[in-house]
Image (tube, rainbow, N blue to C red):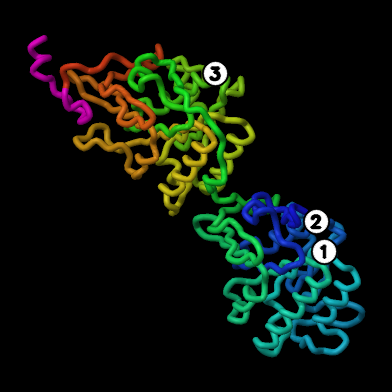
Amino acid sequence: MNNGRIRTGISGFDEILHGGLIPERTYLIRGGPGAGKTTFGLHFLLSGARSNSLFITFGESEQQLRENAKLCGLPMDDVAVLDLSPSLEESGETYTLLESWEVEGNGVYEHILTHVQEHRPERILIDSLSQMRYLAADTFLFRKQVMSLLRKLTALGATVLFTSEEGAGDDDEILPFLSDGVISLEQSENGRHCQISKLRGSSFASGAHFFSLSDSGIRLYPRLVPGHHGRKVEHTLLGSGLPEFDALTHGGIERGTVTLLSGPTGVGKTTLGAQIMSEAAKRQERSVIYSFDEGSSTFFARCGQVGLPVRDMIAGGYLNFEPVEPLHYSPDEFADRVRYEVEECNTTMVMIDSLSGYQQSVRGQELEQRVHALCRYLVNMGVTVILVNEIFSITDQHTRVTEFGLSYLADNIIILRYIELESELRKSIGVLKKRAGNFERALREFEVSSEGLKVGQPFHGLRGILSGTPEITKSRQDSE
Protein backbone atom coordinates (compact mmCIF):
# COMPACT_ATOMS: atom_id res chain seq x y z
CA MET A 1 0.00 0.00 0.00
CA ASN A 2 1.10 3.58 -0.67
CA ASN A 3 -1.18 6.42 0.47
CA GLY A 4 -4.13 4.09 0.04
CA ARG A 5 -2.82 2.83 -3.33
CA ILE A 6 -1.70 -0.65 -4.26
CA ARG A 7 1.49 -1.19 -6.21
CA THR A 8 1.58 -2.98 -9.53
CA GLY A 9 5.05 -4.44 -9.06
CA ILE A 10 6.23 -2.94 -12.35
CA SER A 11 9.34 -0.79 -12.05
CA GLY A 12 8.51 2.76 -13.10
CA PHE A 13 4.80 2.21 -13.62
CA ASP A 14 3.67 3.23 -10.16
CA GLU A 15 5.53 6.49 -10.71
CA ILE A 16 3.33 7.46 -13.66
CA LEU A 17 0.29 6.38 -11.61
CA HIS A 18 1.41 8.81 -8.89
CA GLY A 19 1.68 6.03 -6.34
CA GLY A 20 -0.21 3.02 -7.67
CA LEU A 21 -3.72 1.79 -8.44
CA ILE A 22 -6.76 2.79 -6.43
CA PRO A 23 -7.96 -0.40 -4.74
CA GLU A 24 -11.28 -2.13 -5.34
CA ARG A 25 -11.62 -0.80 -8.87
CA THR A 26 -11.37 -2.28 -12.36
CA TYR A 27 -8.63 -1.66 -14.92
CA LEU A 28 -8.48 -2.63 -18.59
CA ILE A 29 -5.16 -3.60 -20.19
CA ARG A 30 -5.37 -3.29 -23.98
CA GLY A 31 -2.93 -4.32 -26.65
CA GLY A 32 -2.24 -6.58 -29.58
CA PRO A 33 -0.74 -10.07 -29.45
CA GLY A 34 2.67 -10.09 -27.77
CA ALA A 35 2.28 -6.59 -26.34
CA GLY A 36 2.85 -7.83 -22.77
CA LYS A 37 -0.69 -7.79 -21.33
CA THR A 38 -0.46 -11.11 -19.48
CA THR A 39 3.02 -10.31 -18.17
CA PHE A 40 1.68 -6.97 -16.93
CA GLY A 41 -1.09 -8.77 -15.07
CA LEU A 42 1.34 -11.28 -13.57
CA HIS A 43 3.39 -8.46 -12.04
CA PHE A 44 0.19 -7.15 -10.46
CA LEU A 45 -0.75 -10.54 -8.98
CA LEU A 46 2.74 -11.29 -7.65
CA SER A 47 3.28 -7.88 -6.03
CA GLY A 48 0.61 -8.63 -3.44
CA ALA A 49 0.17 -11.59 -1.09
CA ARG A 50 0.17 -14.51 -3.52
CA SER A 51 -2.35 -16.43 -1.43
CA ASN A 52 -4.75 -13.51 -1.96
CA SER A 53 -4.35 -13.40 -5.75
CA LEU A 54 -6.46 -15.11 -8.43
CA PHE A 55 -5.79 -15.66 -12.13
CA ILE A 56 -8.94 -16.32 -14.17
CA THR A 57 -7.95 -17.70 -17.57
CA PHE A 58 -10.16 -18.13 -20.62
CA GLY A 59 -7.33 -18.84 -23.05
CA GLU A 60 -4.36 -20.86 -21.82
CA SER A 61 -4.72 -23.80 -19.49
CA GLU A 62 -3.41 -23.58 -15.94
CA GLN A 63 -0.44 -25.79 -16.80
CA GLN A 64 0.49 -23.61 -19.77
CA LEU A 65 0.18 -20.45 -17.69
CA ARG A 66 2.44 -21.71 -14.94
CA GLU A 67 5.06 -22.94 -17.40
CA ASN A 68 5.07 -19.67 -19.38
CA ALA A 69 5.14 -17.55 -16.21
CA LYS A 70 8.20 -19.44 -15.00
CA LEU A 71 9.96 -18.86 -18.33
CA CYS A 72 9.19 -15.12 -18.02
CA GLY A 73 10.89 -15.00 -14.64
CA LEU A 74 7.54 -14.56 -12.84
CA PRO A 75 6.71 -17.98 -11.32
CA MET A 76 3.12 -18.21 -10.14
CA ASP A 77 3.79 -20.38 -7.09
CA ASP A 78 0.93 -20.12 -4.55
CA VAL A 79 -1.22 -18.05 -6.95
CA ALA A 80 -4.65 -19.62 -7.42
CA VAL A 81 -5.83 -20.19 -11.01
CA LEU A 82 -9.47 -20.52 -12.03
CA ASP A 83 -9.14 -22.34 -15.33
CA LEU A 84 -12.09 -21.64 -17.64
CA SER A 85 -10.20 -22.35 -20.84
CA PRO A 86 -11.86 -24.47 -23.56
CA SER A 87 -12.36 -28.16 -22.78
CA LEU A 88 -11.82 -27.66 -19.08
CA GLU A 89 -13.20 -30.50 -16.99
CA GLU A 90 -14.08 -29.71 -13.42
CA SER A 91 -16.25 -31.76 -11.08
CA GLY A 92 -17.11 -34.10 -13.92
CA GLU A 93 -18.61 -31.27 -16.01
CA THR A 94 -17.16 -29.71 -19.17
CA TYR A 95 -17.21 -25.96 -19.82
CA THR A 96 -16.67 -24.63 -23.31
CA LEU A 97 -16.75 -21.14 -24.77
CA LEU A 98 -19.88 -22.09 -26.67
CA GLU A 99 -22.05 -22.37 -23.59
CA SER A 100 -24.34 -19.56 -22.50
CA TRP A 101 -23.85 -17.65 -19.28
CA GLU A 102 -27.41 -18.54 -18.44
CA VAL A 103 -26.86 -22.32 -18.20
CA GLU A 104 -28.35 -23.08 -14.83
CA GLY A 105 -26.05 -24.54 -12.17
CA ASN A 106 -22.79 -24.43 -14.06
CA GLY A 107 -22.74 -21.03 -15.80
CA VAL A 108 -19.36 -19.34 -16.01
CA TYR A 109 -20.75 -16.21 -14.41
CA GLU A 110 -21.91 -18.08 -11.30
CA HIS A 111 -18.76 -20.19 -11.26
CA ILE A 112 -16.53 -17.10 -11.01
CA LEU A 113 -18.65 -15.44 -8.33
CA THR A 114 -18.88 -18.62 -6.26
CA HIS A 115 -15.10 -19.02 -6.29
CA VAL A 116 -14.49 -15.37 -5.36
CA GLN A 117 -17.10 -15.41 -2.60
CA GLU A 118 -15.49 -18.50 -1.12
CA HIS A 119 -11.81 -17.42 -1.32
CA ARG A 120 -12.09 -13.61 -1.23
CA PRO A 121 -8.97 -12.74 -3.30
CA GLU A 122 -7.76 -9.15 -3.10
CA ARG A 123 -6.25 -9.11 -6.61
CA ILE A 124 -7.85 -10.65 -9.69
CA LEU A 125 -6.58 -10.91 -13.25
CA ILE A 126 -9.03 -11.96 -16.00
CA ASP A 127 -7.26 -12.99 -19.21
CA SER A 128 -8.89 -12.27 -21.53
CA LEU A 129 -12.31 -10.68 -21.20
CA SER A 130 -12.56 -10.61 -25.01
CA GLN A 131 -13.16 -14.37 -24.93
CA MET A 132 -16.22 -13.91 -22.77
CA ARG A 133 -18.03 -12.23 -25.65
CA TYR A 134 -18.72 -15.69 -27.07
CA LEU A 135 -20.73 -16.55 -23.97
CA ALA A 136 -23.28 -13.77 -24.58
CA ALA A 137 -26.02 -13.74 -27.17
CA ASP A 138 -25.49 -10.11 -28.22
CA THR A 139 -23.62 -6.89 -27.42
CA PHE A 140 -26.28 -5.61 -25.03
CA LEU A 141 -26.20 -8.79 -22.96
CA PHE A 142 -22.38 -8.87 -23.04
CA ARG A 143 -22.22 -5.34 -21.67
CA LYS A 144 -24.79 -6.06 -19.00
CA GLN A 145 -23.07 -9.24 -17.85
CA VAL A 146 -19.57 -7.73 -17.80
CA MET A 147 -20.75 -4.70 -15.85
CA SER A 148 -22.53 -6.91 -13.34
CA LEU A 149 -19.52 -9.21 -12.93
CA LEU A 150 -17.01 -6.39 -12.43
CA ARG A 151 -19.23 -4.60 -9.93
CA LYS A 152 -19.76 -7.73 -7.87
CA LEU A 153 -16.06 -8.58 -7.84
CA THR A 154 -15.08 -5.12 -6.57
CA ALA A 155 -17.93 -5.21 -4.05
CA LEU A 156 -16.30 -8.36 -2.65
CA GLY A 157 -13.14 -6.35 -2.00
CA ALA A 158 -11.10 -7.23 -5.09
CA THR A 159 -9.04 -5.00 -7.37
CA VAL A 160 -9.56 -6.35 -10.89
CA LEU A 161 -7.34 -6.19 -13.96
CA PHE A 162 -8.70 -7.62 -17.20
CA THR A 163 -7.14 -7.85 -20.61
CA SER A 164 -8.56 -7.26 -24.05
CA GLU A 165 -7.15 -7.82 -27.52
CA GLU A 166 -6.97 -4.51 -29.40
CA GLY A 167 -9.00 -4.75 -32.57
CA ALA A 168 -10.59 -8.04 -31.49
CA GLY A 169 -14.04 -6.80 -32.37
CA ASP A 170 -16.53 -3.97 -32.11
CA ASP A 171 -17.95 -5.41 -28.90
CA ASP A 172 -14.63 -4.82 -27.11
CA GLU A 173 -14.96 -1.09 -27.73
CA ILE A 174 -17.42 -0.87 -24.85
CA LEU A 175 -14.89 -2.23 -22.32
CA PRO A 176 -13.09 1.10 -21.73
CA PHE A 177 -16.41 2.60 -20.67
CA LEU A 178 -16.98 -0.18 -18.14
CA SER A 179 -13.57 0.15 -16.47
CA ASP A 180 -12.16 2.68 -14.02
CA GLY A 181 -8.83 2.81 -15.82
CA VAL A 182 -7.48 2.04 -19.29
CA ILE A 183 -3.84 1.05 -19.89
CA SER A 184 -2.75 0.56 -23.49
CA LEU A 185 0.36 -1.41 -24.47
CA GLU A 186 1.72 -1.02 -27.98
CA GLN A 187 4.55 -2.65 -29.87
CA SER A 188 5.96 -0.83 -32.92
CA GLU A 189 9.16 -0.61 -34.93
CA ASN A 190 10.25 2.24 -32.64
CA GLY A 191 9.87 0.15 -29.48
CA ARG A 192 7.24 -0.68 -26.87
CA HIS A 193 4.99 2.06 -25.48
CA CYS A 194 2.62 2.22 -22.52
CA GLN A 195 -0.03 4.91 -22.26
CA ILE A 196 -2.77 5.60 -19.73
CA SER A 197 -5.86 7.13 -21.28
CA LYS A 198 -8.21 6.94 -18.30
CA LEU A 199 -7.86 6.73 -14.51
CA ARG A 200 -10.94 7.66 -12.53
CA GLY A 201 -10.33 9.56 -9.33
CA SER A 202 -6.64 10.23 -9.94
CA SER A 203 -4.20 12.17 -12.06
CA PHE A 204 -1.45 10.41 -13.97
CA ALA A 205 1.56 11.10 -16.17
CA SER A 206 0.15 11.51 -19.66
CA GLY A 207 1.81 10.60 -22.93
CA ALA A 208 3.50 7.47 -24.22
CA HIS A 209 6.18 5.91 -22.01
CA PHE A 210 8.68 3.37 -23.31
CA PHE A 211 8.96 0.00 -21.61
CA SER A 212 11.05 -3.13 -22.06
CA LEU A 213 9.97 -6.77 -21.91
CA SER A 214 12.62 -9.31 -20.92
CA ASP A 215 13.04 -12.63 -19.13
CA SER A 216 12.65 -10.74 -15.86
CA GLY A 217 9.32 -9.17 -16.85
CA ILE A 218 8.38 -5.56 -17.63
CA ARG A 219 10.28 -2.42 -16.79
CA LEU A 220 8.76 0.94 -17.64
CA TYR A 221 10.71 4.16 -18.14
CA PRO A 222 8.59 7.20 -17.24
CA ARG A 223 8.82 10.08 -19.68
CA LEU A 224 11.02 12.77 -18.20
CA VAL A 225 9.17 15.85 -16.92
CA PRO A 226 11.81 18.44 -15.91
CA GLY A 227 9.46 20.48 -13.73
CA HIS A 228 9.03 17.56 -11.32
CA HIS A 229 12.70 17.66 -10.31
CA GLY A 230 14.94 20.31 -8.83
CA ARG A 231 17.74 21.25 -6.42
CA LYS A 232 19.26 24.49 -5.22
CA VAL A 233 22.62 25.24 -6.81
CA GLU A 234 25.15 28.07 -6.75
CA HIS A 235 26.24 29.04 -10.26
CA THR A 236 29.96 29.21 -9.46
CA LEU A 237 32.59 29.36 -12.21
CA LEU A 238 34.28 26.06 -13.07
CA GLY A 239 37.83 26.31 -14.36
CA SER A 240 39.07 24.02 -17.12
CA GLY A 241 42.72 23.72 -16.11
CA LEU A 242 43.65 25.61 -19.30
CA PRO A 243 44.43 29.26 -18.39
CA GLU A 244 43.96 30.54 -21.94
CA PHE A 245 40.61 28.77 -22.30
CA ASP A 246 39.47 30.28 -19.01
CA ALA A 247 40.57 33.66 -20.36
CA LEU A 248 38.30 33.10 -23.37
CA THR A 249 35.36 32.36 -21.06
CA HIS A 250 36.32 34.98 -18.45
CA GLY A 251 36.87 32.46 -15.69
CA GLY A 252 35.25 29.27 -16.98
CA ILE A 253 31.76 27.92 -17.52
CA GLU A 254 29.11 28.18 -14.81
CA ARG A 255 27.93 25.25 -12.74
CA GLY A 256 24.43 24.10 -13.68
CA THR A 257 24.56 25.39 -17.27
CA VAL A 258 24.53 23.79 -20.72
CA THR A 259 27.66 24.12 -22.86
CA LEU A 260 27.61 23.22 -26.54
CA LEU A 261 30.94 22.19 -28.09
CA SER A 262 30.50 22.57 -31.83
CA GLY A 263 32.94 21.52 -34.52
CA PRO A 264 33.80 19.05 -37.29
CA THR A 265 35.10 15.53 -36.71
CA GLY A 266 38.51 15.17 -35.09
CA VAL A 267 38.86 18.80 -34.05
CA GLY A 268 39.08 17.96 -30.31
CA LYS A 269 35.54 18.40 -28.92
CA THR A 270 35.45 15.21 -26.83
CA THR A 271 39.01 15.73 -25.57
CA LEU A 272 38.18 19.27 -24.48
CA GLY A 273 35.14 17.96 -22.61
CA ALA A 274 37.30 15.32 -20.90
CA GLN A 275 39.77 18.06 -19.91
CA ILE A 276 36.99 20.02 -18.20
CA MET A 277 35.93 16.82 -16.39
CA SER A 278 39.51 16.17 -15.22
CA GLU A 279 39.31 19.45 -13.29
CA ALA A 280 36.01 18.29 -11.77
CA ALA A 281 37.81 15.14 -10.59
CA LYS A 282 40.41 17.31 -8.85
CA ARG A 283 37.51 18.86 -6.95
CA GLN A 284 36.43 15.28 -6.09
CA GLU A 285 33.27 15.60 -8.17
CA ARG A 286 31.85 12.79 -10.28
CA SER A 287 31.27 13.13 -14.03
CA VAL A 288 29.80 10.80 -16.65
CA ILE A 289 30.37 10.63 -20.40
CA TYR A 290 27.70 8.96 -22.54
CA SER A 291 29.50 8.09 -25.74
CA PHE A 292 27.31 7.26 -28.73
CA ASP A 293 30.22 7.47 -31.17
CA GLU A 294 33.19 5.49 -29.82
CA GLY A 295 34.13 2.67 -27.50
CA SER A 296 36.05 2.85 -24.25
CA SER A 297 39.36 1.47 -25.61
CA THR A 298 39.56 4.19 -28.27
CA PHE A 299 38.64 6.90 -25.78
CA PHE A 300 41.18 5.71 -23.18
CA ALA A 301 43.96 5.49 -25.77
CA ARG A 302 43.24 8.96 -27.15
CA CYS A 303 43.10 10.58 -23.71
CA GLY A 304 46.29 8.78 -22.67
CA GLN A 305 48.11 10.29 -25.65
CA VAL A 306 47.39 13.82 -24.41
CA GLY A 307 48.07 13.10 -20.75
CA LEU A 308 44.49 13.03 -19.44
CA PRO A 309 44.31 10.54 -16.50
CA VAL A 310 40.86 9.16 -17.34
CA ARG A 311 41.69 5.63 -16.11
CA ASP A 312 42.69 7.02 -12.71
CA MET A 313 39.51 9.12 -12.66
CA ILE A 314 37.41 6.02 -13.29
CA ALA A 315 39.31 3.99 -10.69
CA GLY A 316 38.74 6.76 -8.16
CA GLY A 317 35.01 6.90 -8.87
CA TYR A 318 35.19 10.39 -10.34
CA LEU A 319 34.35 9.43 -13.92
CA ASN A 320 32.02 6.96 -15.57
CA PHE A 321 32.59 6.43 -19.28
CA GLU A 322 29.58 4.63 -20.71
CA PRO A 323 29.52 3.58 -24.38
CA VAL A 324 25.93 3.62 -25.61
CA GLU A 325 24.57 1.62 -28.52
CA PRO A 326 21.79 4.01 -29.57
CA LEU A 327 19.55 1.44 -31.26
CA HIS A 328 19.39 -0.56 -28.01
CA TYR A 329 17.90 2.27 -25.96
CA SER A 330 14.73 4.29 -26.16
CA PRO A 331 14.98 7.98 -25.14
CA ASP A 332 13.02 7.24 -21.94
CA GLU A 333 15.36 4.37 -21.05
CA PHE A 334 18.39 6.55 -21.65
CA ALA A 335 16.90 9.33 -19.50
CA ASP A 336 16.35 6.76 -16.76
CA ARG A 337 20.06 5.87 -16.84
CA VAL A 338 20.96 9.56 -16.57
CA ARG A 339 18.59 10.01 -13.64
CA TYR A 340 20.23 7.11 -11.81
CA GLU A 341 23.66 8.72 -12.22
CA VAL A 342 22.43 12.07 -10.95
CA GLU A 343 20.11 10.96 -8.15
CA GLU A 344 21.90 7.84 -6.89
CA CYS A 345 25.58 8.49 -7.74
CA ASN A 346 25.60 12.27 -7.08
CA THR A 347 27.03 13.04 -10.52
CA THR A 348 27.61 16.78 -11.07
CA MET A 349 28.68 16.86 -14.75
CA VAL A 350 27.24 15.01 -17.76
CA MET A 351 28.58 14.95 -21.32
CA ILE A 352 26.57 13.59 -24.26
CA ASP A 353 28.84 12.69 -27.15
CA SER A 354 27.32 13.32 -29.57
CA LEU A 355 23.92 14.74 -30.53
CA SER A 356 24.11 12.88 -33.85
CA GLY A 357 24.48 9.59 -31.99
CA TYR A 358 21.74 10.44 -29.52
CA GLN A 359 19.42 11.16 -32.43
CA GLN A 360 19.58 7.48 -33.37
CA SER A 361 18.06 6.45 -30.02
CA VAL A 362 15.16 8.87 -30.51
CA ARG A 363 14.10 6.93 -33.64
CA GLY A 364 11.39 9.08 -35.15
CA GLN A 365 10.72 11.11 -31.99
CA GLU A 366 11.32 14.84 -31.80
CA LEU A 367 15.05 15.25 -31.06
CA GLU A 368 14.64 18.86 -29.95
CA GLN A 369 11.88 17.95 -27.50
CA ARG A 370 13.84 15.06 -25.98
CA VAL A 371 17.12 16.96 -25.63
CA HIS A 372 15.25 19.95 -24.18
CA ALA A 373 13.61 17.79 -21.48
CA LEU A 374 16.87 16.04 -20.59
CA CYS A 375 18.91 19.26 -20.40
CA ARG A 376 16.26 21.12 -18.41
CA TYR A 377 16.10 18.23 -15.93
CA LEU A 378 19.88 18.23 -15.50
CA VAL A 379 20.03 22.01 -15.08
CA ASN A 380 17.20 21.87 -12.53
CA MET A 381 19.27 19.32 -10.60
CA GLY A 382 22.32 21.61 -10.66
CA VAL A 383 24.25 19.42 -13.10
CA THR A 384 26.67 20.96 -15.60
CA VAL A 385 25.91 19.69 -19.11
CA ILE A 386 28.29 19.38 -22.06
CA LEU A 387 26.72 18.63 -25.44
CA VAL A 388 29.05 17.60 -28.24
CA ASN A 389 27.76 18.53 -31.68
CA GLU A 390 29.47 17.50 -34.88
CA ILE A 391 29.00 19.71 -37.89
CA PHE A 392 29.22 17.96 -41.22
CA SER A 393 31.74 20.16 -43.03
CA ILE A 394 35.44 20.76 -42.48
CA THR A 395 35.31 24.39 -43.64
CA ASP A 396 32.27 26.43 -44.61
CA GLN A 397 31.58 29.96 -45.80
CA HIS A 398 28.34 29.84 -43.76
CA THR A 399 29.31 28.92 -40.21
CA ARG A 400 26.87 26.51 -38.56
CA VAL A 401 26.64 25.83 -34.85
CA THR A 402 24.30 22.82 -35.06
CA GLU A 403 22.15 21.18 -37.69
CA PHE A 404 19.49 20.32 -35.10
CA GLY A 405 18.23 23.79 -34.14
CA LEU A 406 19.30 23.30 -30.52
CA SER A 407 21.55 26.32 -30.02
CA TYR A 408 18.81 28.03 -27.96
CA LEU A 409 19.30 25.38 -25.25
CA ALA A 410 22.94 26.27 -24.73
CA ASP A 411 24.01 28.78 -22.12
CA ASN A 412 27.52 28.63 -23.57
CA ILE A 413 28.58 27.88 -27.15
CA ILE A 414 32.22 27.00 -27.84
CA ILE A 415 33.13 26.71 -31.52
CA LEU A 416 36.12 24.72 -32.73
CA ARG A 417 37.10 24.90 -36.40
CA TYR A 418 39.78 23.84 -38.85
CA ILE A 419 41.58 26.55 -40.75
CA GLU A 420 44.02 26.37 -43.64
CA LEU A 421 46.96 28.65 -42.94
CA GLU A 422 50.15 28.72 -44.97
CA SER A 423 49.26 25.34 -46.55
CA GLU A 424 48.86 23.79 -43.10
CA LEU A 425 45.72 22.49 -41.40
CA ARG A 426 45.36 24.16 -38.01
CA LYS A 427 42.59 24.57 -35.44
CA SER A 428 40.86 27.53 -33.86
CA ILE A 429 38.64 27.97 -30.79
CA GLY A 430 36.31 30.76 -29.75
CA VAL A 431 33.26 31.58 -27.66
CA LEU A 432 30.09 32.44 -29.51
CA LYS A 433 27.71 32.77 -26.54
CA LYS A 434 27.82 32.99 -22.75
CA ARG A 435 24.53 33.83 -21.08
CA ALA A 436 25.75 34.24 -17.52
CA GLY A 437 28.65 36.59 -18.19
CA ASN A 438 31.01 38.24 -20.59
CA PHE A 439 33.59 36.49 -22.77
CA GLU A 440 36.53 37.22 -25.02
CA ARG A 441 35.58 37.97 -28.64
CA ALA A 442 38.91 36.91 -30.12
CA LEU A 443 39.57 33.57 -31.81
CA ARG A 444 42.58 31.64 -30.53
CA GLU A 445 44.62 28.79 -31.91
CA PHE A 446 43.77 25.38 -30.47
CA GLU A 447 46.16 22.44 -30.43
CA VAL A 448 45.89 18.80 -29.31
CA SER A 449 49.35 17.22 -28.89
CA SER A 450 51.25 14.70 -26.80
CA GLU A 451 51.87 17.50 -24.31
CA GLY A 452 48.15 17.98 -23.81
CA LEU A 453 45.63 20.58 -24.89
CA LYS A 454 46.86 24.04 -25.60
CA VAL A 455 44.91 27.22 -26.26
CA GLY A 456 47.23 29.77 -27.84
CA GLN A 457 47.23 33.53 -28.19
CA PRO A 458 44.49 35.31 -30.19
CA PHE A 459 44.93 35.33 -33.95
CA HIS A 460 46.08 38.77 -35.18
CA GLY A 461 46.16 40.12 -38.70
CA LEU A 462 43.76 37.50 -40.12
CA ARG A 463 40.21 37.74 -41.33
CA GLY A 464 37.75 35.08 -42.50
CA ILE A 465 39.03 32.53 -39.97
CA LEU A 466 35.61 30.87 -39.54
CA SER A 467 35.39 30.26 -43.27
CA GLY A 468 38.39 27.95 -42.93
CA THR A 469 40.52 29.90 -45.40
CA PRO A 470 41.58 33.12 -43.64
CA GLU A 471 43.19 36.05 -45.41
CA ILE A 472 46.09 38.11 -44.15
CA THR A 473 45.08 41.71 -43.50
CA LYS A 474 47.06 44.68 -44.81
CA SER A 475 48.32 45.58 -41.33
CA ARG A 476 49.87 42.14 -40.94
CA GLN A 477 51.40 42.31 -44.39
CA ASP A 478 53.02 45.64 -43.52
CA SER A 479 54.37 44.29 -40.23
CA GLU A 480 55.83 41.26 -41.96
In front: 226, or 310? 226
Dot 1 alpha-carbon crowd within 10 angstroms: few under 14, some 14 to 19, many 20 or more: many
Q: Which mark is residue 283?
A: 3
Note whether 197 is above or below 211 in the view shown: below
* Location of residue 38 in the rendering, given as x and y in whole percent from the top left corner: 70, 63
The answer to whether residue 328 is seen in the rendering is: no
CB atoms at circles 1 and 2 under 8 Å apart?
A: yes
The residue segment tinted magenta is: 463-480
Indicate yes or no whether the magenta region holds residue 143: no
Residue receiving disc 2: 48
Q: Amino acid at mark 2?
A: Gly
Q: Amino acid at mark 1?
A: Glu
Q: Amino acid at mark 3?
A: Arg
In-image side of 327 versus 99 (left or right): left
* Location of residue 23 in the rendering, given as x and y in whole percent from the top left corner: 75, 63
How far separated are the C-alphas under marks 3 and 2? 46 Å
